[in-house]
Image (cartoon, rainbow, N blue to C red):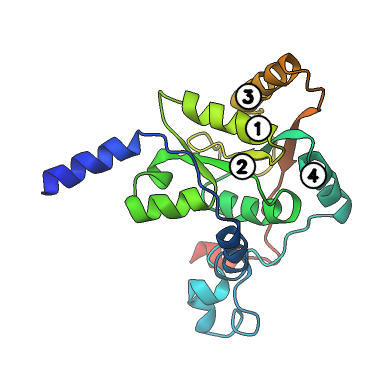
Amino acid sequence: QALEAAEDCLSRLDEFVAPRPNFALIGAMTAVNRVLMLKGVAGLRDLPLLNRIAGLRGITNIRAIDFPKSDERRLADACAPPNVTFVTPNHPEFFTDWMIDKEISTRACPKAAFWATNTVVNGLGKLVQKFWLANNLIAQIPGNSEPARAHSVNWALQGHGVLLHPEGGVGWHGDYVAPLMPGAAEMAMEALELARKAGDRRRILIAPVVWKLVFQKDVEKELLC
């Protein structure tokens, strides 16, 4: 039985399953993300001892996102139908990237689909896979990216937007902008070709998003502990 379970897990890992977005769930996860993952619980997150509990403090401890309204509107306009848009965040690291992208997408492109590594989407069991697919995550299958690319282009052509996490390729850099991931441009060109063949003259856009993490106070003491 253990061998069968392991074989089932491995076969699921490399099998592309199209997302089945549940927008009620996605909306509910926005609140969970803001409290549990980002900001923490106001009034408790700074109390001694309680501020050591990740869920009260906010697991990533992102207190504020300085996202100017003008930039927010520009991204929302780019992601709005009838545009066909691929959003490309400049990620310096893992985990926090998804939490910040979740907040950004909620504000600017709430129906966007998200690329993520197959080990996250498919590799943690059927129930977790169902959860991530309901959150509109697209599994990146190493060596077999065509189904994910085709789904992404189709979803973008519906006017919803696709956000590309560079899983496996983050550079752990906070002070410079990394090169654009080539897959975004390739998928945008595919979308352009399909649209023009169908007589569709809509704009095909690549929307770079650059963010930087900064401390709001001197943390030298904490870093040296």
Compared to 75, does 55 lie above or below? below
* Crowd tier of the residue under label 1, counting other residues whose Cα lies within 10 Å: few below 14, some 14–19, many 20 or above: some
User: Disc 3 marks which residue?
Assistant: 187
Q: Tell me, for residue 178, which label it has, or none.
A: 1
Q: Where is residue 179 in the image (x, y as percent from the top left)?
A: 66, 28
Question: Which of the marked residues, 4 or 3, is nearer the chain's N terminus?
Answer: 4
Q: Tell me, for residue 91, which label it has, or none.
A: 2
Classify residue 142 as left or right of residue 10: right
In space, the residues marked 2 and 1 are separated at their CA atoms by: 8 Å
Q: What residue type is labelled 3?
A: Met
**x 61%, y 41%: residue:** 173
Question: Which of the marked residues, 4 or 2, is nearer the chain's N terminus?
Answer: 4
In-front residue for pair 164/109: 109
Q: Position of residue 67 (x, y in %)?
A: 79, 55
- Mark toward the viewer: 4 or 2: 4
In space, the residues marked 3 and 1 are separated at their CA atoms by: 19 Å
Question: Which of the marked residues, 2 or 1, is nearer the chain's N terminus?
Answer: 2
Q: What residue type is labelled 4?
A: Leu
Question: Which of the marked residues, 4 or 1, is nearer the chain's N terminus?
Answer: 4
In space, the residues marked 3 and 2 are separated at their CA atoms by: 19 Å
In space, the residues marked 4 and 1 are separated at their CA atoms by: 19 Å
Q: Tell me, for residue 75, which label it has, or none.
A: 4
